[in-house]
Amino acid sequence: MADTDADKLARAKAALARMPARTRRIFVANRVEGLSYAEIAEREGLFLWQVRRHMLRAIRIIARHML
């Protein structure tokens, strides 16, 4: 049975809710606000590699919830 858009949205929201706050902020800044990793690093006071690490964490969390 195919998932409805409402099912997918509910799972995506649940995934966002399970993320650590900083990881969620970084994910939203990149995917919703359209900021680059460099812009996010400056805003959050992080190194670029730390932003990448948070994005990988966020994507893994979302992937697990979307299966």
Image (cartoon, rainbow, N blue to C red):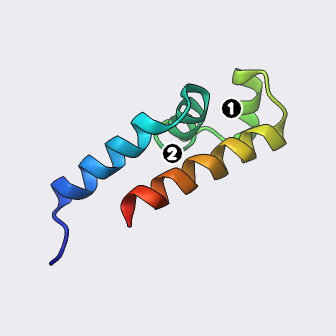
Q: Nearer the viewer, residue 67 or 27?
A: 67
Note whether 17 is above or below 21 in the view shown: below
Q: In x, y percent, where is residue 58?
A: 56, 47
Whether 1 is drawn above or below 61: the answer is: below
Q: Label 2 crowding class (10 Å Cα cut-off): few <14, some 14-19, many 20+?
A: few
| Residue 27, disc | none
Asked which quadrant contains residue 26, the reply is top right
| Residue at image coords 71%, 32% | 39
Residue 29 position, x and y percent, is 55, 34
Q: Which residue is mark 1?
A: 40
Graded by Cα atoms within 10 Å as few (under 14), some (14 to 19) or many (20 or more), the crowding at tag 1 reads many
Q: Circle 2 sits on which residue? A: 31
For mark 1, give the secondary structure: helix
Q: Nearer the viewer, residue 40 or 20?
A: 20
Which image quarter: residue 2?
A: bottom left
Q: Which residue is painted at 63% across and 48% down in the image?
A: 57
Which residue is pictured at 17% across the width and 53% down the height?
Answer: 6
Label 1 to label 2, Cα distance in Å? 11 Å
- Type of residue at label 1? Ile
Residue at 78% across, 21% down: 45
Q: Is residue 2 left or right of residue 51?
A: left
In screen coordinates, is 10 left or right of 55?
left
Q: Position of residue 67 (x, y in %)?
A: 38, 67
State the residue in front, 53 or 41: 53
Q: Amino acid at mark 2?
A: Arg
Q: Is residue 65 left or right of residue 59?
A: left
Estimate the x, y position of residue 54 in percent, counting from the top left. 67, 41
Judged from the image, the secondary structure of the residue bearing numbered disc 2 is helix
The earlier-in-sequence mark between 1 and 2 is 2
- Quadrant of the snapshot with the N terminus: bottom left
In the image, residue 21 above or below residue 67: above
Q: Quadrant of residue 27?
A: top right
